[in-house]
Image: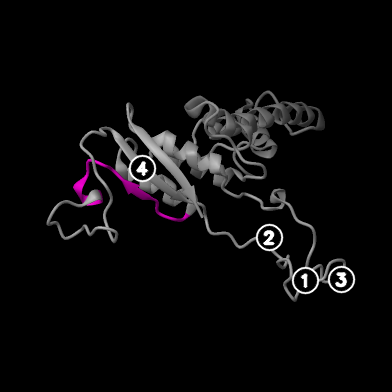
Amino acid sequence: MAIGDKTNIQARLQLALPKQWFLDDGPVIGAILGALATAWAWLYSLYAYIKLQSRILTASDGWLDVIAGDFFGSAITRKAGQTDTSFRAKIIINLFRERATRNAIILVLTQLTGRAPLIIEPQRPADTGAYSAPNSGYGSSGAYGSMLIPYQAFVKAFRPATSGIPMIAGYGNAPAGYGVASQGGEYASMGMIQGAVQDADIYAAVSAVAPAASTLWTQISN
């Protein structure tokens, strides 16, 4: 017996009845109380479910999608086959994500792709170097800077390193044998790579944390 189930509610109703009204627990009164308890147990379970859906940490099913829509519109949606736990983590990360800083761009791209981006701000000597500075060398380190390019940066993002399609050998690889029992090889498509990070995801991630009134020239590389 658990709190709020049929047995628990029926026992509570039984205890609330005046003893002088009912001298025994006959089948008639038991059936009536059982019917009431069944309906109220369902209501209690509905209340418990609704209470869970009112908080991000405990919400589930389509309610997580509703929460994501309330906060982010169509910017963040559940991917095909994505679990509640994974989607909840994505919502929380984006709610409390650092934004509008250089570090915010590094964090979001590193979390998304597993690889830190290269960022160059033309007005930042730490990126471009300076005359007689130890962090610059013509043709070897540093980048061209300019005081005439304010509020702009160059971002080189990297696609995540992938392991291809599991259980399928590469074309021309010795283990691959098309049509054999081991299924070492087969005709594959990009659709077989589940959960892959697309270039559009990378552009969207940069745009989501970029400072207002700034321009981030983004390049994506392998």
> Quarter holding the N terminus?
top right
Mark 4 surroundings within 10 Å by alpha-carbon count, few (fewer than 14), some (14 through 19), many (20 or more) = some
Q: Which residues are magenta?
A: 114-127
Q: CA distance from mark 1 to mark 3?
A: 11 Å
Disc 1 to disc 3: CB gap under 8 Å: no
- Label 2 amino acid? Ile
Determine the CA span between mark 2 and mark 3.
Answer: 18 Å
Residue 176 in the image: above or below residue 69 = below
Q: In terms of image quadrants, where is residue 59? A: top right
Q: Nearer the viewer, mark 4 or mark 2?
A: 4
* Residue holding disc 4: 154
Specify the label residue 96 is tagged with: none
Q: Please state the horizontal and vertical placement of residue 127, each as a whole percent of the image.
A: 25, 50
Task: From the image, tell me which residue sits under label 1.
Answer: 176
Number of disc labels? 4
Is residue 48 visible in the rendered structure shown here? no
Counting from the top left corner in percent of width and height, residue 169 is at 72, 68
